[in-house]
Amino acid sequence: MDIDLYVRAIASWGEEFQRQLAVGELNELAAALTRYNLGRENSDEVASEMADVYIMLEQVELMLGNMEQVEAYRSKKLERLRGRLEEREHGRN
């Protein structure tokens, strides 16, 4: 995470603007994925929008000041996914 760059962006444009921008980037990713799901080859567009979303999510995480909480939720949800996959895989065998 490029914290210095993010701090500068937030200081320059403000937290509210950056949160609004994050919403816009999420919407752009959703639109790109919809086009991809409709059979349009746009993997470059999806990758570009994903990069924008990662950048904005890191800024939101920094603004909220709860990086540890986000990571704790992430770990918990990954563990839940792991458990669901194991149940599914063992149920098929």
Image (tube, helix red, strand yellow):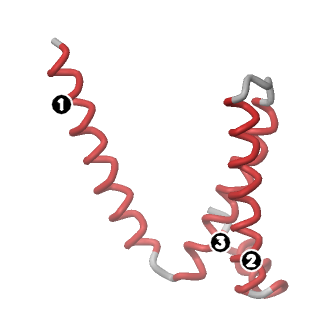
Q: In this view, does 27 lie above or below 13?
A: above
Give the image location of residue 90, x and y in percent: 15, 21
Query: What residue is shown at x 24% (from left), y 37% (from top)?
Result: 84
Q: Which mark is residue 18?
A: 2
Image marks 1 and 3: residues in contact by CB distance under 8 Å: no
Rounded to the nearest angstrom, the CA distance separating label 2 from label 3 is: 8 Å
Q: In this view, does 8 lie above or below 87?
A: below
Q: Mark 1 points at which residue?
A: 87
Q: Nearer the viewer, residue 33 or 72?
A: 33
Q: In which quarter of the image is residue 57?
A: bottom right
Q: Which of marks 1 and 3 is nearer the N terminus?
A: 3
Give the image location of residue 11, x and y in percent: 77, 87
Q: Earlier in the sequence, mark 2 or mark 3?
A: 2
Rounded to the nearest angstrom, the CA distance separating label 2 from label 1 is: 40 Å
Q: Identify the amino acid type marked 2.
A: Gln
Query: What residue is shown at x 72% (from left), y 73% (from top)?
Result: 6
Give the image location of residue 7, x and y in percent: 71, 80
Q: In which quarter of the image is residue 70?
A: bottom left
Circle 1 SS class: helix
Q: Name the residue under label 3.
A: 59
